[in-house]
Amino acid sequence: AKLKLAIVVGSNRRESINRKLAQALAKLASDSFEPSFVQIDDLPLFNQDLEPNRPEPTLRLKREIEAADAILIVTPEHNRSIPAVLKNAIDWASRPYGRNSWAGKPVAVTGTSGGGVGTAVAQNELRMIMTNLAGVVVGSQVFITFKEGLIDAGHNVTDEGTRSFLKGFVDGFAKTAGKLAA
Ligand code: FNR
């Protein structure tokens, strides 16, 4: 059976370039993974006071992360850090204390920005956070400079070099995640 891949996009923007990249990665990954997207834009802002009576979207998030064999996070960079909407989701799924849903999941991280080194700083921070929570962050660092038309309406990467590079990234992740799941 294929490994279940939960994809988290760190943007709630309608025309998110990171969602476009994530959709292209889902398509490239479908040989080796069964991909699904995790919704994070309807989670309330984390507040410990809500924990005794946790809102349903936060429970759904935990169920989806726990059901996954591997996690792919595709994130923008906001002011040299990860977007608040992503941190909010990470925090919700890490709780309650002792019931961290990320624990033991292999995680891969990437992201895109219009800038050349865009998302590098955010990805470093995210790798640190996820190493602490999940234990295993897999793969080398991948930064994609987004250009108009890079990904078409059918979620295909139009540039052949970028396409084969991203295919290598998802296939490498599947291989390592498969070993960890065995
Ligand atoms: C940005 N952007 C940005 N880009 C970057 O490469 N490094 C950064 O530090 C920032 N900082 C930043 C802060 C805030 C508040 C916003 C709204 C934007 C630009 C960012 O890369 C651009 O908006 C992307 O389109 C965001 O990705 P999504 O939402 O389209 O996936």
Image: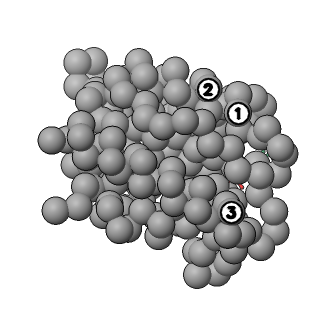
Q: Which mark is residue 108?
A: none
Task: Identify residue for label 1.
Answer: 120
The answer to whether the residues at label 1 and label 2 have Cβ atoms under 8 Å apart is yes
Task: Identify residue for label 2.
Answer: 124
**Which residue shows up at 62% across the image and 26% down it?**
124
Looking at the picture, does residue 101 appear above or below residue 36?
above
Can residue 147 be spotted in the picture? yes
**Which residue shows up at 60% across the image and 24% down it?**
125
Which quadrant of the figure has residue 15? bottom right
Can residue 58 be spotted in the picture? no
Q: Which of marks 3 and 2 is nearer the N terminus?
A: 2
Task: Identify residue for label 3.
Answer: 161
Q: Which of marks 3 and 1 is in front?
A: 3
Q: Nearer the viewer, residue 25 or 76?
A: 25
Give how far across and how far down residue 6 sits, in percent.
36, 52
Give how far across and how far down residue 111 sits, in percent.
63, 46
Label 3 – label 1 distance at C-alpha: 20 Å
Quadrant containing ligand 1 reads top right
Q: Earlier in the sequence, mark 3 or mark 1?
A: 1
**Which residue shows up at 36% across the image and 28% down it?**
136
Label 3 – label 2 distance at C-alpha: 24 Å
